[in-house]
Image (tube, coloured by chain):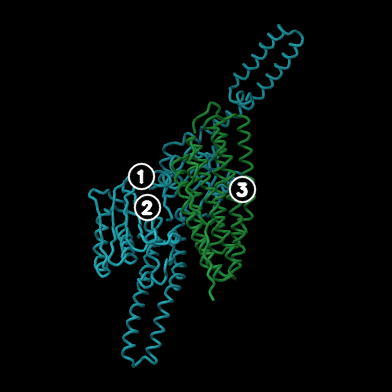
Amino acid sequence: MLWAIVYRANLNGALLFAAAGLVGGALAVATLGVFGLWIVGATVVAATLLAVFSARRIVAAHTQSAIAADDSTVLPQRTRDVLETIVDPLMLIDTGGRVVFANTAMQALAGTDAESKNVAAVIRTPVILEALESTQRTGEPSSVEYAERVPVERHYEGHLVHTARPPRVTVLLLHDLTALKRAEQARADFIANASHELRTPLASLTGFIETLLGHARDDEVAREQFLEIMHVEAQRMRRLIDDLLSLTRIELNEHVPPAGEVQLGDIVRDAVATLAPIAQTERVSLVPEIPPNLPTVQGERDDLVQVFLNLIHNGIKYGRPGGHVWIALSAPAGESAYGRGGREMVSAVIRDDGDGIPREAIPRLTERFYRVDIKRSRERGGTGLGLAIVKHIVNRHQGRLLIESRLGEGSTFTVLLPVASAIEETAPAPVTELL
Amino acid sequence: MSEHIVKAFSEQLEGLSSGIAQMGGLAEAQLADAVEAIGKRDSTLAERVIAGDPRIDELQQASEDRALKLLALRQPMAVDLRDTLAAIKTANELERIGDLAKNIAKRALVLNREPPIRLTQSLARMGRAALSQLKLVLDAYSDRDAAGAEAVWRKDGEIDEIYNSLFRELLTYMMEDPRTIGLCTHLLFVAKNIERTGDHATNIAEVVYHMVTGGHLANERPKADITSSTAVPYERNE
């Protein structure tokens, strides 16, 4: 403790300390005699040593803090303005590992108030921290590539350069490679999924064509029947291709926040109108509940229409024939959002009175090509992609998708979407849930 | 962090928490790589995860030493004491997560020698859910965000649900075809390890909550892991 005090006190203080030792010593001599003299000697020596030693440390500390004050606390406003214009995330870090400056793009990525924090509290990616350490040690620039996997997978290239003249700072510049990597991945996935899922209807089509070319050529009844089946299979292939294409498109844009403001009420009305004929055929009543004066949400109209089309259509497909599908919108009601900073959400609840979903299937519903009941999904014309599409769209809108269901009691799908003003405030820190 | 008269004290406290953040970053990367090694059948990556584990252990030791030194020399009080305690506890949890990542990577090496099966994708997905929890709780630690920590704490049930679902599915496979028992057991252990990392993230959430507020999250956390009492009826197909 003593050391800490002396270390932080200034030089005069330390000398004063030595003087105090002398005075104290003199008093001790007066009271304790020869033995006291010995104590005085020891105290004076200790105090002097302390004074000299701490003086050296203090000078060193002063020099250091002078440098620190030069570069860390006062970055000229003009320099800041210039650095602010750089669109890629950029950060300046002093030799003590403290963030001197972070531009808006960097703050969007690593959270606001990054400045003056230790760099590890802002970016903890190991490759970046290692590269920073090596650049500061050697003075050599370094470049690293890394991926953030959650909440949305993103790829970056980080460049680190140490300035040549003191006060030295390290510049960290990040370059977003996500779009590039996503394009590569989307292509690979599309080929894999499409070929696998398209093979089944194709095999069936080929089979019937062969039969028609062969012994069924002149069988009027069989021909009609086969053509009917072939028609259904061909339609299934088309739906599958449509869904795969929209999924690919959505995934490519998942990391781009949506532009535009929309009224969910209009979107639900449109979706209900589109699905009304199908609902009528299945004898299912659609019951929308749209309260007036809902706040708008920031979102892309076409994407959100697809969310409601898919969810309501699922309600019709897997609900009870002659049953109901309820679609209820409601204004934010204290839903504290998840992650860095709370946000207000508009909720849309789509509920059916069908058979419900087994508990163990619920967490996996949004997996691509996951089906609770493969046979039933095929019969009802499902592609196994509907909810995956919904999940990706909701993800992109920084919303949440909640699924509740109990066997025999129907299922409830809740979509929460941030209101337009809220998303603007928190847009810098993209937060999403996977389910 | 509020200012201290002795500036070195503030710096030491901050050094402690940035050491934890650094360690957290490493644990995140290890878990992410281990999960990716399973999902993408990448044995080289798995080897790298195994080789990287001692580094986390080193950092844990260093954090603990730092914290001890701070306790001994500064006798921290109130929030400073909670900070120090949180650092020790979090370092401990992160070290366990590192071990689990290493175990997952070891199993990945075995799994990658077997023919690919679809279920590994579900595992990778569960892994990403756990990773998301870890990221959010480390964000909450760095931002001193009690609400964020509480949200993580409430959300652990989702990982448990995925685990339950996978557990049932694996049991069913093993019953249908006893030849898959070897493979399925490895998958089961991977799933269990991932589920455990979720629990450790939840523990960190409790620590962060206490660090920031001084209060405790309710003693009983929402538990949805029911596998210890799950049995799939065995039906012999003649």
**Which residue extends farthest left?**
A292
Q: Name the amino acid type tagged 1.
A: Glu
Residue drawn 73% across and 11% down? A36
**Tag 2, which secondary structure?**
loop
Q: Earlier in the sequence, mark 2 or mark 1?
A: 2
For residue A425, the mark is 1
Chain identity of mark 3: B
Reading the image, the residue beneath label 2 is: A399
Q: Nearer the viewer, mark 2 or mark 1?
A: 2
Which chain is painted in green?
Answer: B
Chain identity of mark 1: A
Image side of residue B92 versus residue A222, left or right = right
**Tag 1, which secondary structure?**
helix
User: Which of these two is toward me, A188 or B203?
Assistant: B203
Mark 3 nearby-residue class (10 Å; few <14, some 14–19, many ≥20): many
Which chain is painted in cyan?
Answer: A
Reading the image, the residue beneath label 3 is: B56
